[in-house]
Image: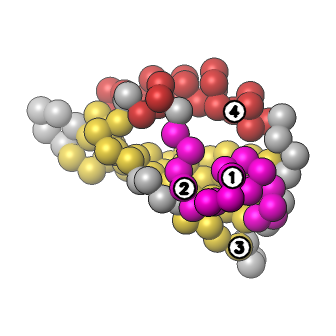
Amino acid sequence: MIVRSWSARLASQNVSRYLAHLDRSVKPGLATLSGFIGLTVLERIVEEGASPASEVVVQTRWESLDAVRAFAGDDISAAVVEPGAAALFRDYDRRVLHYKVIG
């Protein structure tokens, strides 16, 4: 199994909007892809105070790198970010990391 890991930084009040975007636009499309196993979203607060900020880490699970390639294209390390999601972010990773699950 392969884990594709990517992160973004956003205002904490936008986290629920991002999760709604994932549920509405991203997850249904991923569910139709051969080799897609699942998705997990992690959050941590990176700034507190007057304008709190969060970092979200999105980890998708795939059967193989070939399944990732079918989703992401030949440059599997390029982030795939829909414009609707990008508009919510202060910044996001343009490159993605891939991990082989070994345990």
SS for tag 2? loop
Name the spot of residue 36 as percent of width and height, x first.
80, 48
Kind of residue indicated by mark 1: Gly
Mark nearest the camera among 2 and 4 is 2
State the separation of the CA atoms marked 4 and 3.
22 Å
Find numbered disc 1 in the image and state the secondary structure of the residue it sits on: loop
Q: CA distance from mark 2 to mark 4?
A: 19 Å
- Which residue bears the numbered disc 2? 78
Residue range (magenta): 64-81
Q: Return the residue at label 4.
A: 27
Looking at the image, is mark 3 or mark 2 earlier in the sequence?
A: 2
For mark 1, what is the residue?
73
Q: Is residue 37 visible?
A: no
Mark 4 and mark 3 lie on one chain; the one further toward the N terminus is: 4
Q: Nearer the viewer, mark 1 or mark 3?
A: 1
The answer to which of marks 2 and 4 sits earlier in the sequence is 4
Q: Amino acid at mark 3?
A: Lys
